[in-house]
Amino acid sequence: MNESKADILNSIHPQPQHRHYLVFTGYAVFIWSIAYMLPHLYWALGGTIGLSLLKESVAEAAFWERINWIASGFLTAAGCVGIAFIYIRKQKVVSWLLLGIALFGCSIATSHGIYGIFYRIFQMTGVVELESVPFNINEHSFVLWDLLLFEPWFMIEGILFGFLGWFYMNKPRNRRIWIILCTVGIIIGLVSGVSGVRFA
């Protein structure tokens, strides 16, 4: 009996292939998201440790606690998505939903991180104006912390979501499409940032 094209592809790329990579990446997304959620939850509950890393006007805003509650919810949901990729069976509708979320997360988080890193570097070097005054480490330490801590977190989160979708698939063609979609999404996010629209 002749094997169909689908059978041949499945024999070359069995369903459990890269399962251990998927599990590792799913847990990495969960841990990475929850690790960033915890300080937001702490600030939402009124904590003050670490506020010196942020721009003073942001930490003193009236909606500061509300923002952190919302961020805590989103980050917890992002972590749960990583777990869902591991344990939820590959049903068609669920798979498309998870991949759509991962694509969105990869595009927004990666472009946010890349844009933020370059933007902060430009502020520190004087290419981009910073509050109408030159960069001063004592007055603008939040810029340095954003460059070294917060923006890299976004970029790594986005990359992890990209890998999550990659390892979830088992066909080379689907993976090529996935890379293209993630790349286009990141480019759109970067263009949005340059246009003055930033997400998160």
Image (cartoon, rainbow, N blue to C red):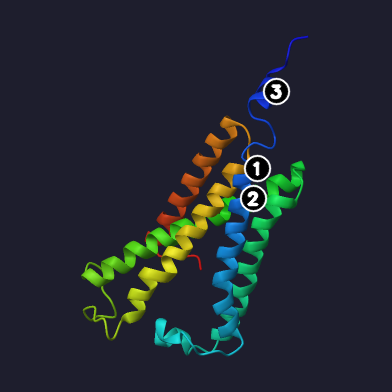
Which mark is first along the chain, 1 or 3?
3
Label 1 to label 2, Cα distance in Å?
A: 6 Å
Q: Which residue is mark 2?
A: 23
Q: Which residue is mark 1?
A: 19
Q: Kindly identify the amino acid type of the residue bearing the numbered disc 2.
A: Val
Q: Are marks 1 and 2 in contact (CB under 8 Å)?
A: yes
Of marks 3 and 2, the one in the foreground: 2
Q: Kindly identify the amino acid type of the residue bearing the numbered disc 3.
A: Ala
For this view, does 61 lie left or right of residue 68? left
Label 3 to label 2, Cα distance in Å?
A: 25 Å
Q: Is residue 29 above or below residue 97?
A: below
How many marks can you see? Answer: 3
Q: What is the crowding at mark 3: few (fewer than 14 residues within 10 Å), some, or many (at least 20)?
A: few
Q: Are marks 3 and 2 in contact (CB under 8 Å)?
A: no
Label 3 to label 1, Cα distance in Å?
A: 20 Å
Q: Which secondary structure lies at badge 2?
A: helix
Q: Kindly identify the amino acid type of the residue bearing the numbered disc 1.
A: Arg
Q: Are marks 3 and 1 in contact (CB under 8 Å)?
A: no
Of marks 3 and 1, the one in the foreground: 1
Q: Which residue is mark 3?
A: 6
For this view, does 28 lie left or right of residue 89? left
Does residue 197 appear in the picture of this structure?
no
Q: Is residue 191 above or below residue 153?
A: above
The picture quadrant where one finds residue 147 is bottom left
